Amino acid sequence: MKQKRYNQEFKQTIVELYRSGTSASDLSSEYGVSEVTICKWIKALSLIEDSGGLSPAEIAEFQKENLRLQQEVDILKKAMTIIAKK
């Protein structure tokens, strides 16, 4: 069975309909999307209150960038140690 692909605008529309009071089961039957998928979209597009209004995807992106920068700093520290010995 071929997996359907939905664009971001469609996902946001479904989440907005859910937030306006339409149940996930009603949205599922009306738009042909499984309830589990709708729940995943709601979770992914929901803002985390403690994060200053960032979505989980944005937080994950910042964490990935932070890890990359920490690795760069570690490399530079090692390079400085090698240079200082010469």
Image: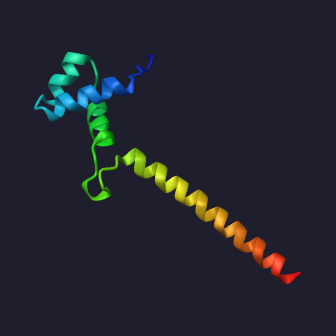
Residue 75 location, x and y as percent?
Answer: 71, 67
Which quarter of the image is occupied by the C terminus?
bottom right
Residue 42 location, x and y as percent?
Answer: 27, 38
> Horizontally, is 60 left or right of 76 in the view?
left
Q: Is residue 26 visible?
A: yes
> Horizontally, is 30 left or right of 11 in the view?
left
Q: Which residue, as the protein is rendered here, is positioned at the far right?
A: 86
- Nearer to the camera, 60 or 79: 79
Picture residue at 10% right of the left edge, 32% below the top: 21
Picture residue at 24% right of the left edge, 27% below the top: 14
- Nearer to the camera, 63 or 2: 63
> Horizontally, is 86 left or right of 1 in the view?
right
| Residue 33 to residue 70: above or below | above
Picture residue at 60% right of the left edge, 57% below the top: 68
- Nearer to the camera, 2 or 53: 53
Q: Which residue, as the protein is rendered here, is positioned at the far bottom?
A: 85
Q: Is residue 24 visible?
A: no
Picture residue at 37% right of the left edge, 48% below the top: 56
Quarter-of-image position of residue 79: bottom right
Residue 20 location, x and y as percent?
Answer: 13, 32
Which quarter of the image is occupied by the N terminus?
top left
| Residue 26 to residue 52: above or below | above
> Horizontally, is 21 left or right of 43 in the view?
left
Quarter-of-image position of residue 57: top left
Residue 5 location, x and y as percent?
Answer: 42, 21
